[in-house]
Image (cartoon, rainbow, N blue to C red):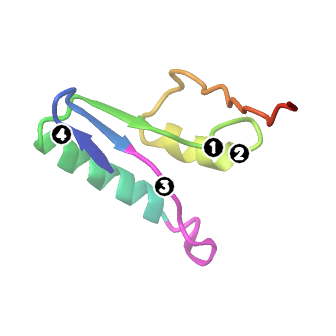
Amino acid sequence: MWLDEANKTAEFEPVGTHPDYRRLGLGRAMLLQGMHLARAAGATHMTVACLGAPGHPKARGLFYSVGFREFTRDAPLIKTKTAG
């Protein structure tokens, strides 16, 4: 979790749980505790950078389960090597 005091925002990134410990509520508990601590530190907004695309429904489901909602989607950009 990153706290941006100037903008009163906390960002969770990266977020993950080891495969042997998934589906035990650990990721959810970490997010809820982190949001509690961020709020106590003055944060008024929380964001998460996630693989919430259609190909990653479990990640998206975790974030939705603690109150996050889609705000925007990043557009990946790439610069290829040009000849010459």
Q: Which residue is mark 3?
A: 15
The residue type indicated by label 3 comes to Val
10 Å crowding of disc 2: few (<14), some (14-19), many (20+): few
Q: Who comes first in sequence, dot 1 or dot 2?
A: 1
The residue type indicated by label 1 comes to Leu
Left or right, residue 3 beside residue 41: right
Q: Which residue is mark 1?
A: 51
Q: Which residue is mark 4?
A: 39
Q: Is residue 19 magenta?
A: yes
Q: Who comes first in sequence, dot 2 or dot 3?
A: 3
Measured in 3D between alpha carbons, the distance from the residue under mark 1 to the one under mark 2, in whole angstroms, is 6 Å
Q: Residue at x 28, y 52 (%)?
A: 34
Q: Are marks 4 and 3 in contact (CB under 8 Å)?
A: no
Measured in 3D between alpha carbons, the distance from the residue under mark 3 to the one under mark 1, in whole angstroms, is 10 Å
Badge count: 4
Measured in 3D between alpha carbons, the distance from the residue under mark 2 to the one under mark 3, in whole angstroms, is 13 Å
- Quadrant in the rendering for residue 28: bottom left
Decide which of 79, 16 is in the foreground and name it. 79
Quadrant where the C terminus lies?
top right
The residue type indicated by label 4 comes to Arg
Helix, strand or loop under label 1:
loop
Q: Who comes first in sequence, dot 3 or dot 1?
A: 3
10 Å crowding of disc 1: few (<14), some (14-19), many (20+): some
Q: Which residue is mark 2?
A: 56
Q: Are marks 1 and 2 in contact (CB under 8 Å)?
A: yes
Q: Residue at x 71, y 45 (%)?
A: 56
The residue segment tinted magenta is 12-24
In this rendering, the answer to whether 46 lies above or below 57 is above
